[in-house]
Amino acid sequence: MQVAVVTFDGFNELDSFIAAALINRCRKDGLEAFITTPTPVVTSMNGVEVTGQRPMEFVTEAEVVLIGSGVKARDVVADDQLISRLRLDPSRQLIGSQCSGALVLARLGLLNGMPVCTDMKTRPFVEACDVTVLDAPFHSEGNIATAGGCLASQYLATWVITRTLGENAARDVLDYVAPVGENRETVDRALRAVRTGEAALH
């Protein structure tokens, strides 16, 4: 199973890299994430240049697509040509957004009244799209999930791993990366966030 971590120019390193790194700990189980970019090289909000592993068109074949955030998110959603390259299908793909990535989901018309999680700076712009923003780090409905706050990217990765490989696989990954001495609470917190986010509003 392939995961496209969509990473635009001006991206937030925490959002793209944490999700990709956690998911890639499941390579041996057939789950692999790729930094997917609209141009061969993108530059982060802090000036880090990254060469994309897959072109944007990879999103059509990936089983999972995660839309990362960044300081140019509003430019992204205003670019009709760029948006047209994001051909997503929630009937057959798991689709998630991180922080300002929620603007992309709204622009693509994928939310259908679903409330979202996003960061505080992006919140007013998401609300301007007539989308309800939750005071929560993670929310999912069906095959669509959103996460708010940079470090909530671990919850997005947990959701992907749980949905594709099961909760035990997610536990193993989280236990490995947890701060020493905080393993149990790290695992429990992430799984609780995902379970709560899935149960909310149902």
Image (tube, rainbow, N blue to C red):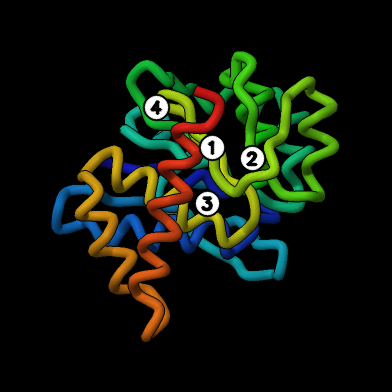
Query: Alpha-carbon neighbours of circle 4 within 10 Å: few (<14), some, or many (≥20)?
Result: some
**Mark positioned earlier in the residue sequence (1 or 2):** 2
Kindly indicate the quadrant of the structure image that contains residue 181: bottom left
The label nearer to you, 1 versus 4, is: 1
**Residue 40's disc number:** 3
Query: Real-space Cα distance between discs 3 and 4?
Result: 18 Å
Label 1: element kind? strand
Whether residue 38 is visible here, answered yes or no, is no
Q: Are marks 3 and 4 in contact (CB under 8 Å)?
A: no
Which residue in the protein does label 4 denote? 60
**Mark positioned earlier in the residue sequence (3 or 1):** 3
Which residue in the protein does label 1 denote? 139
Q: Report the residue at 46% width, 23% height from top.
A: 88
Query: Alpha-carbon neighbours of circle 2 within 10 Å: few (<14), some, or many (≥20)?
Result: many
**Mark positioned earlier in the residue sequence (3 or 4):** 3
The label nearer to you, 3 versus 2, is: 2
Q: Are marks 3 and 1 in contact (CB under 8 Å)?
A: no
Q: In the image shown, does 23 or 137 lie closer to the viewer? A: 137
**Mark positioned earlier in the residue sequence (2 or 4):** 4
* Residue 13 as seen in the image, left or right of residue 19: right
Please determine whether, in this image, residue 90 is positioned above or below residue 121: above
Label 4: element kind? helix
Please determine whether, in this image, residue 112 is positioned above or below residue 107: above
Amino acid carrying mark 3 in the image: Pro
Label 3: element kind? loop
Kindly indicate the quadrant of the structure image that contains residue 94: top left
* Residue 23 as seen in the image, left or right of residue 125: left
Q: Are marks 1 and 2 in contact (CB under 8 Å)?
A: yes
The label nearer to you, 3 versus 1, is: 1
